[in-house]
Image (cartoon, rainbow, N blue to C red):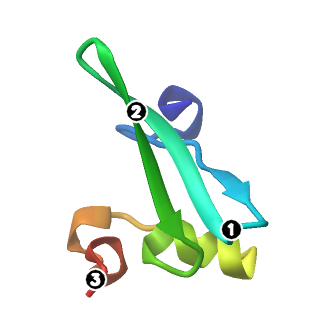
Amino acid sequence: MAAGTGTARGTLYIIDPARRELWSKVAQGPEKVEIRLPMGMGIAGCVAETGEVIRIQDAYRTPASTGT
């Protein structure tokens, strides 16, 4: 996925409309950890809520990525 978008890494989130949440699974060593966050929180949550594309050069320097 990251190679196809020209990015260093990426996460695919699934929208759970009943809970108004995004979720994903991440491999951490041999375990898979589930990530859940509310729609509207962070960059991914804002995109899910508004449906608008956001292109960010450096996500680590973007306040929305840290929730601040």
Query: Residue 50 in the image: x percent, y percent?
Result: 71, 82
In primary-sequence order, the first of circles 3 and 2 is: 2
Amino acid on which the number 1 mark rests in the picture: Arg
Q: Are marks 3 and 1 in contact (CB under 8 Å)?
A: no
Q: Residue 57 placed where, x, y %?
A: 37, 64
Mark 2 residue element: strand
**Front-lying residue, 13 or 43:** 13
Most extreme residue toward the bottom is: 68
Q: Quadrant of residue 48?
A: bottom right
Q: Dot 1 corresponds to which residue?
A: 19
Residue type at mark 3 is Pro
Going from N to C along the chain, the mark reached first, 1 or 2, is 1
Distance from disc 3 to disc 1, alpha carbons, whole Å, reads 25 Å
Kindly identify the residue that appears in the image at 47 percent across and 78 percent down. 41
| Residue beneath disc 2 | 26
The mark closer to the camera, 1 or 2, is 1
The residue tagged 3 is 63
Q: State the residue in front, 52 or 17.
A: 17
The residue sitting at the top extreme is 30
Q: Position of residue 58 (x, y in %)?
A: 29, 64
Image spot of residue 53 (x, y percent)? 66, 69
- Vertical relation: 68 (above or below) 8: below
Q: Which residue is rendered at x = 45% and y = 42% of the image? A: 10
> Does residue 55 appear in the picture of this structure?
no
SS at circle 3? helix
Q: Secondary structure at mark 1?
A: loop
Tally of numbered discs: 3
Q: Is residue 58 left or right of residue 32?
A: left
Q: Categorize mark 1 by other alpha carbons within 10 Å: few (<14), some (14-19), many (20+).
A: few
Q: Residue at x 78, y 66 (%)?
A: 18
Residue 41 seen from this side = yes
